[in-house]
Amino acid sequence: MSQANRDPGSERGRDSSGAGPGAWHEDVDDATRARRSAYWRRNIRSVGILLAIWFLVSYGLGILWVEPLNELTLPGTHYPLGFWFAQQGAIYVFVILIFVYVRLMNRLDREFDVDERDVEVPAEGLDHLRRLSGLAALREAQSYKERARCAARGSRP
């Protein structure tokens, strides 16, 4: 995306039209729109499948089918399988699904050539990120009362 369409003096990521962050004003061709649409369709489909698996494991195996699964034991232990899925198995599956999602998205990003491996961040972008992270650290480190006291004095936290 082109930086030329953004107002370089804008504050808080707003452009000259007053739109918020991410409001890029560029004309894209139909092929680019089609690629973006295909990318998001595949992304949403992946998320949907992973959420369905998570629901099946956590709700199905941990709640609905817990009694039949309790007749089986976890191999190598004496724990009923339904109890194990309700207490730990669903969490393990959820963590595994996170790693599967990362792998799927990295593959999808490479396929659509939107991966971040060779992206160079301009110096002004790094400065902006440093300012944002500094503000977040200040907000977290200081209590609401301290910030209010600083505001009352007219000083900055």
Image (tube, helix red, strand yellow):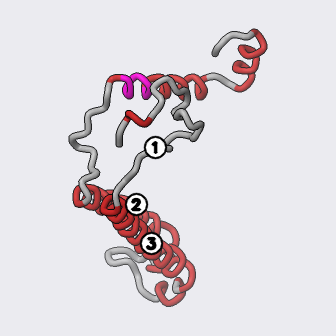
Say whether residue 64 is left or right of residue 2.
right
Tell which of 144 and 35 is nearer to you.
Answer: 35
Q: Secondary structure at mark 2?
A: helix
Q: Residue at point 38% right, 77% down?
A: 74
Q: Which residue is mark 3?
A: 48
Q: Residue at point 40% right, 50% down?
A: 27
Q: Secondary structure at mark 1?
A: loop
> Is residue 18 visible in the rendered structure shown here?
yes
Q: Position of residue 153 (x, y in %)?
A: 76, 9
Graded by Cα atoms within 10 Å as few (under 14), some (14 to 19) or many (20 or more), the crowding at tag 3 reads few
Q: Amino acid at mark 1?
A: Trp
Picture layout, residue 51 above or below residue 33: below
- Label 2 to label 3, Cα distance in Å? 16 Å
- Label 2 to label 1, Cα distance in Å? 35 Å
Q: Earlier in the sequence, mark 1 or mark 3?
A: 1
Say whether residue 69 is left or right of residue 77.
right
Q: Which residue is mark 2?
A: 95
Picture layout, residue 6 above or below residue 31: above
Say whether residue 152 is left or right of residue 155.
right
Residue 157, numbered circle: none
Q: Is residue 142 magenta?
A: no
Graded by Cα atoms within 10 Å as few (under 14), some (14 to 19) or many (20 or more), the crowding at tag 1 reads some
Q: Position of residue 76 (x, y in %)?
A: 32, 75
Q: Residue at point 33% right, 78% down?
A: 75
Q: Position of residue 70 (x, y in %)?
A: 49, 84
Q: Which residues are magenta?
A: 124-129
Q: Which residue is mark 1?
A: 24
Say whether residue 112 is left or right of residue 14.
left
Picture layout, residue 37 above or below residue 24: below
Tell which of 63 and 104 is nearer to you.
Answer: 104
Q: Nearer the viewer, mark 2 or mark 1?
A: 1
Q: Residue at point 68% right, 25% down?
A: 143
